Image: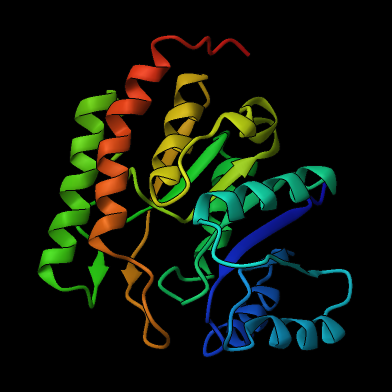
Amino acid sequence: MEHKNLVIIPTYNEKENIEAMIEKVFSLPVPFHMLVVDDNSPDGTATLVREAQKTHPGKLHLLERAGKLGLGTAYIEGFKFGLAHGYDYIFEMDADFSHDPCDLIRLYKACSQEGADLAIGSRYKSGVNVVNWPIGRVLMSYFASLYVQIITGMRIHDTTAGFKCYARKVLETLDLEKIRSKGYGFQIEMKFTAWKYGFQVVEIPIVFTDRRLGTSKMSGGIFNEALWGVISMKLWSLFRSYKR
């Protein structure tokens, strides 16, 4: 049975990367469709995607938004698109090649063949597999994940990872309207909520390589938002039911 697979890629000023990413994903031996969610990139990212749609009709989709509305809301809109269009497996991935597109196949197999409901491309499952990051950023990311594990009780090594595969039933079960985080805290909240519902969550070790082209959107403020949000999220969860 061939599954319908959708890779969601949020973009803001990714003209250096997006065309190569589109071609790489569509060259993989497992068939994937792609949805680019562009937040009105002034560099013309969306224009390049529209051009590429002529070469990949029916496989490459574009959702253009009015401006920078947050990573979390971009993915939520993407998830709704994926569910509405009947996709079986829905993926999150960055546009900048920090995530190796070939690893999409490993995440897909973890869910479609090995029984996982949510597969995470993990930088910290087997040591620290991060290339070209300054040591301060590695430590901030690593200890942020450790902090989340302690506060939430989740046995997930890379709680802030943004490279994931969801089985459809996970996104159908989570009430997407109740996901409160907008920035990188969104990645933590989605994993935590899936875990609270009792879904099978696995980590697949990957090597994360910092972008070569374009500009990073990461900042210390993003991490601060995530860290303070974890306490709020944990407290909020005490008053919620997670029955499927």
Q: Position of residue 148 (x, y in %)?
A: 25, 35
Colour scheme of the picture: rainbow
Total marks shown come to 0
User: Relative to 225, is 151 above or below?
Assistant: above
Q: Give percent across and percent down for residue 223.
A: 27, 52
Q: Residue at x 52, y 19 (%)?
A: 197
Q: Is residue 129 left or right of residue 24?
A: left
Residue drawn at (71%, 57%) of the image: 6
In which quarter of the view is residue 10 placed?
bottom right
Looking at this view, is 169 or 206 the one in front?
169
Residue placed at 69% from the left, 80% from the top? 46
Q: Residue at x 35, y 48 (%)?
A: 160
**Can you give x and y, in whole percent of width and height, for residue 97 in the image?**
46, 76
Q: Looking at this view, is 218 or 20 the one in front? A: 218
Q: Quadrant of residue 214?
A: bottom left
Regarding residue 125, the answer to whether it shows in the image is no
| Residue nearest the observer in this picture, 130 or 193 | 193
Q: Is residue 214 above or below residue 179?
A: below
- Image x and y of residue 151, in percent: 23, 26
Placement of 83 over or under 244, stated as above or below? below
- Quarter of the image with the C terminus is top right
Q: Is residue 93 left or right of residue 61?
A: left
Q: 16 or 32, which is in the foreground? A: 16
Within the image, what quadrant is residue 99 found in? bottom left
Task: Kindly tell me whether residue 159 is visible in this rendering.
Answer: yes
